[in-house]
Image: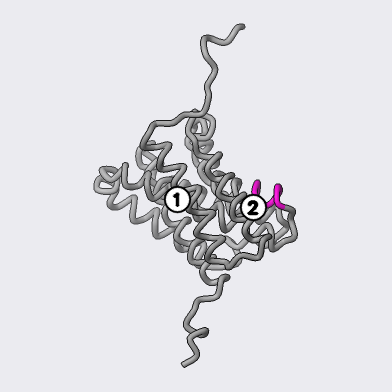
Amino acid sequence: MDVTTAVPEPAVILVVMDLLGIFVFAITGALVGVRKELDVFGVLVLAGATGLGGGFLRDVLLGAVPPASLADWRYLMVPLAAGLLTFVFHPTIGRMERVLNVFDAFGLALFCVTGALKATAFGLGPVPAALMGMVTGIGGGMVRDLLAGRVPIIFRGELYATPALAGAAIAVALERLDQPWWVVAVAGAGVCLVWRLLAMWRHWQAPMPSGPASA
């Protein structure tokens, strides 16, 4: 057997990474909906917005229409399944908050890489492609928080967008250096993941204003 046929294509790996990230993000969005005491429809809306929001925004900005979330049934079924799962088993899932935060960091790492690589495939330069990777990672959470009536997490001192931007920039740089796809994915996602987990563990915060704002 030709061993090359057993190695997954990069495009397949990127789709799998995308779907895993969507599933994790959708659970976090659904959990917010449950805690806001929304009905099942509201929970599913938040799950879908969180899981698909970043990729949807990226595709619209890139002109990749219709967005992948509308063109591929898997992108709709994954957040739907995650939302229903969370709605039914939310007492158990809610007790796994710290684990979910770790999975959320994994989702952020996956999304920043897939978003950046899709942007480079559409011909964007290094800086815009890195920004698209960051948008892919943080977009769903921003939409979720706005729909839930909360200040988005990236504006509350959390080191969230910065690790995503760093991971996306690493992925873009290595991709332009013609490194193997798996090196690009592991390095970019690894930088984002380690930074985000360290920030959570060490309680690192972005600088915030000191003292009351003047009228």
- Which x, y percent locates residue 28? 40, 46
Rendered-image quadrant of the C terminus: top right
Above or below for 59 versus 97? below
Residue at x 56%, y 60% (from the top left corner): 184
- Which x, y percent locates residue 132? 65, 50
Q: In which quarter of the image is residue 143?
A: top right
Task: Give the class, few, some or many, for how many residues have Cα within 10 Å of label 2's Cα (few <14, many ≥20).
Answer: many
Residue at label 2? Answer: 58
Rendered image: mark on residue 185: none
| Residue 75 in magenta stretch | no
Three-letter code, disc 2: Arg
Is the C-beta separation of discs 1 and 2 under 8 Å?
Answer: no
- Which x, y percent locates residue 24? 42, 53
Above or below for 199 versus 67? above
- Which x, y percent locates residue 179? 61, 65
Task: Give the class, few, some or many, for how many residues have Cα within 10 Å of label 1's Cα (few <14, many ≥20).
Answer: many
Magenta span main SS: helix
**Which tag, 1 or 2, sits closer to the chain's start?**
1
Q: What stretch is highlighted in magenta?
A: 126-132
Camera-side residue of 90 and 63: 63
Above or below for 73 versus 158? below
Q: In this view, does 78 lie to the left or right of 166?
A: left
CA gap, disc 1 to disc 2? 16 Å
Rendered image: mark on residue 25: 1
Residue at x 53%, y 72% (from the top left corner): 12
Camera-side residue of 31 and 96: 96
Three-letter code, disc 1: Phe
